[in-house]
Every structure is written in C-alpha cells, then in structure tokens.
Amino acid sequence: MAGEAPELSAQERAGRPFPVSWDQFHRDCRALTWRLNEVGPFHAVIAITRGGLVPAAIVARELGVRVIDTVCIASYDHDKQGDLQVLKGISEQAMKLGGGTGKGLLIVDDLVDTGKTGKLVREMLPDAHFATVYAKPKGRPLVDTFITEVSQDTWIFFPWDTALSYHPPLRDGAA
Ligand SMILES: O=P(O)(O)OC[C@H]1O[C@H](OP(=O)(O)OP(=O)(O)O)[C@H](O)[C@@H]1O
Ligand SMILES: Nc1nc2[nH]cnc2c(=O)[nH]1
Ligand SMILES: [Mg+2]
C-alpha cells in the first residue's frame, strides 16, 4: 500500500549484532553438554538442520552418542522468516528408539528465536529433551536446556555464516 513502511527483516528489527567465533561456539557447546550429561543418557540425537548440525556433532561426541538423525526444516531465507517447511521428517528408526513419543531422545538446535521451529519439532517428539546453545526470550519457554540467553532484539552471527573482514575504527563512526 502507498505510504506504508516496508516490512523489516528479523535482522533489521534485531539491532544488536552478537558475533560468535568457532572457539566460543565450541566452548558453549561443551558447557551445554555438561548440563545435558546430568539429564541423559540419550538413545539418539536429533539435529534440526541446518544450524543444529554443528552443535549436534559436538554434543554427540561429548556424550558418546553415535546415533544421529536429522529433521530438516526451512523457515528463514537469510533473516526473513516465512512458512515453516518440513523437508525431511524424523526417521522411523529414531522414532522407534524414542518409543514413538521421543522419550530418551535429544533434540539439538543452535538457537530458538520466535520458537516456531522448536514448537514444530516438539509436536513431533513431545517427550524428547530439547536443547539449544542460545535462546531469545520468545522461544525460551520451549527449551529444556540452553546456555546463553540474548535479548530478542539481538541477531546472532554464527561462524559458518561469517568471515573475517575489515572493521573501521570507532572514531570513524563504526558501531
Ligand atoms: O525460533 P525460530 O524463530 O523458529 O528460529 C530459530 C531457527 O532459525 C534458524 O534456522 P533457519 O530457519 O535459519 O535455517 P538453517 O538452520 O538452515 O540456517 C535457527 O537455526 C533455528 O532453527
Ligand atoms: N543466524 C541467525 N539465524 C537466526 N534465525 C532466527 N534468529 C536468528 C539469529 O539471531 N541468527
Ligand atoms: Mg535452523
């Protein structure tokens, strides 16, 4: 409609950048595993792709879990969230390990933001344990275990999405 402000992307709404290095991410995943070790044991890890693949590998290694399955969900096109699409569901084998309800399974994702992705996977596996490395307030109630909460107006930049680049000095107006 004429005169209407253009819709802001999630990243534009999220004023604060929160860049995470590989080192930091690895440390945070290890810290998450310390907490999960108190809750398990788990029969299998279910990674929510794609972001959940990286923490799932680290957590599964630390917990000694060798069965890893994926649930493939697309929702954000870079920083704009659209309708959730389940591109691949949980395998029959993993479903069986969780007794059909997810009991003894560990769902892993990199973060919860609005909670839409987490809610959808929880509906598939209501008795599973859901862990994320980072959580924003809207999604936080959906998560059983997480490490760091960031404000809703933060955008987390993961190391696999970023590269080192020049940053101008603060006095020249850099944020
Ligand atoms: O709580 P929500 O608002 O649903 O957002 C959280 C989801 O968004 C990101 O995934 P994305 O859809 O960007 O896909 P990707 O993991 O393939 O990058 C992130 O990895 C979570 O899965
Ligand atoms: N990289 C990234 N993806 C997201 N998807 C939803 N919220 C975020 C975020 O803060 N960072
Ligand atoms: Mg994701």
Image: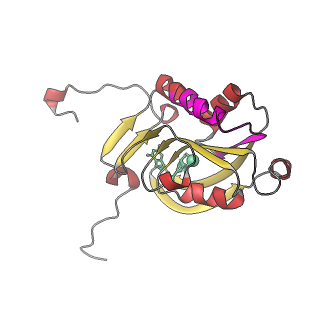
Please tell me in which quadrant of the rendered image residue 40 appears. top right
Left or right: 12, with 162 as reference point: left
> At 85% across and 53% down in the image, what residue appears?
92
> At 73% across and 45% down in the image, what residue appears?
105
Q: How many marks?
A: 0
Q: In the displayed image of the protein, which residue is found farthest to the front?
A: 38
Please tell me in which quadrant of the rendered image residue 57 appears. top right
> At 20% across and 25% down in the image, what residue appears?
169
Q: Position of residue 171 (x, y in %)?
A: 13, 27
> At 23% across and 27% down in the image, what residue appears?
168
Q: Position of residue 11 (x, y in %)?
A: 38, 50
Whether 36 is among the magenta residues is: yes
147 and 166: which is toward the camera:
147
Q: Position of residue 98 (x, y in %)?
A: 80, 50
Q: In the displayed image of the protein, which residue is found farthest to the left?
A: 171
For the N terminus, give its image quadrant.
Answer: bottom left
Magenta span: 28-48
For the C terminus, give its image quadrant.
Answer: top left
Q: In the displayed image of the protein, which residue is found farthest to the bottom?
A: 1
38 and 74: which is toward the camera:
38
Please tell me in which quadrant of the rendered image residue 19 appears. top left
Left or right: 147, with 151 as reference point: right
Whether 29 is among the magenta residues is: yes
Colour scheme shown: secondary structure
